[in-house]
């Protein structure tokens, strides 16, 4: 374990997938403030460059690493770049896709497309990251799951299955990688005001539901998820592994 203050990430390379905006960018911003060298990822290189410019303007160490996490060759190239930069210490598996449809509407190709992004890509990214972390005997992998991996609702079976898989993967990798000094945990967000949730956030019925179905009774802001990611990515979480931390305003513990 690096001899650092509990939340100091100075000099550590941190890859956050899907970090050009939304929850991923909020995490990148906080990790950069803690001293990490943050690698901004997404499929759109222009958006990655814009995010990097914002972080650098605030004196953060940030670099663009645009690639499609579901593309094996592109992922290999990205990790070769990270190896040349000294290797990865922190992986935040944030990229995900949502496809809300009833069970009969899903074809095999639809299901495979979602699983490729939401489960298989995070597994492969963790595999590649562990290969760079193991030689130094230290690493942090933080998987972004969802409360959909803990509880379920009708018409969301594929996404719920993928996120439940992320939770299982988190526990299994924690058990396997612990002896190498690599801690693996997950954060399960609840209802957050992000671009993909814009329509739901504008729906008074959804907001009314949150007022009674969660302890805090409101939507979360992206900046409210980032501290949980920072904690699990930092030396402060040295004795925390294999855990699924719900950041949901009390949704999964309230009735």
Image: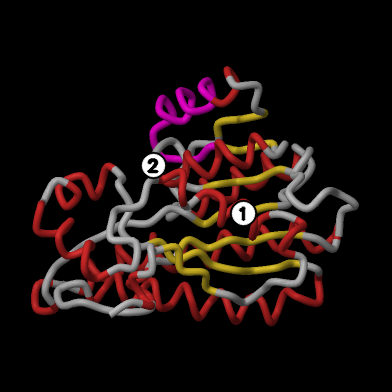
The location of residue 12, given as percent across then percent down, is 75, 43
Q: Is residue 219 left or right of residue 164?
A: left
Give the answer, above or below, for where 57 lies relative to 19.
Answer: above
Give the answer, above or below, for where 94 lies relative to 164.
Answer: above
Q: Residue at x 68, y 82 (%)?
A: 175
Quadrant of res 125: bottom right
The location of residue 33, given as percent across then percent down, is 65, 34
- Label 2–label 1 contact, CB within 8 A: no
* Quarter of the image where the N terminus is located: bottom right
Q: Residue at x 78, y 53 (%)?
A: 6
The location of residue 203, given as percent across then percent down, is 11, 51
Q: Which mark is residue 22?
A: 2
Q: Residue at x 81, y 71 (%)?
A: 180
Taking the view exactly as shown, the residue that stands out farthest to the right is 3
Which residue does the numbered mark 1 point to in the structure image? 91
Look at the image and give the residue range highlighted in magenta: 40-54
Identify the secondary structure beneath mark 1: strand
Alpha carbon distance from label 2 to label 1: 17 Å
Is residue 47 one of those drawn in magenta? yes
Q: Is residue 54 left or right of residue 242?
A: left
Q: Is residue 66 left or right of residue 178?
A: left
Q: Which mark is residue 154?
A: none
**Badge 2 or badge 1: first in the primary sequence:** 2
Identify the secondary structure beneath mark 2: helix
């Amino acid at each position: 374990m690096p001899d650092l203050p509990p939340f100091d990430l100075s000099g550590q390379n941190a890859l956050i997938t899907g970090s050009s905006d939304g929850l991923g960018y909020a995490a990148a911003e906080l990790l950069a403030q803690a001293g990490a060298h943050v690698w901004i990822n997404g499929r759109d290189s222009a958006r990655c460059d814009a995010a990097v410019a914002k972080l650098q303007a605030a004196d953060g160490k940030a670099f663009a690493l645009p690639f499609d996490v579901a593309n094996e060759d592109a992922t290999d190239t990205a990790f070769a770049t990270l190896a040349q930069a000294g290797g990865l210490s922190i992986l935040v598996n944030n990229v995900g896709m949502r496809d809300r449809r009833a069970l009969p509407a899903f074809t095999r190709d639809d299901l495979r497309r979602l699983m490729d992004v939401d489960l298989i890509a995070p597994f492969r990214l963790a595999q590649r990251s562990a290969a760079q972390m193991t030689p130094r005997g230290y690493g942090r992998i933080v998987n972004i799951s969802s409360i959909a991996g803990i509880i379920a609702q009708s018409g969301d079976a594929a996404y719920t299955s993928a996120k439940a898989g992320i939770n299982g993967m988190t526990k299994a990798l924690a058990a396997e990688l612990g002896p190498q000094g690599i801690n693996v945990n997950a954060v399960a967000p609840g209802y957050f005001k992000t671009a993909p949730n814009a329509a739901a956030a504008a729906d008074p019925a959804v907001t009314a539901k949150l007022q009674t179905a969660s302890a805090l009774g409101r939507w979360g802001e992206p900046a409210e998820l980032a501290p949980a990611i920072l904690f699990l990515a930092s030396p402060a979480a040295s004795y925390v592994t294999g855990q699924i931390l719900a950041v949901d305003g009390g949704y999964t513990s309230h009735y």
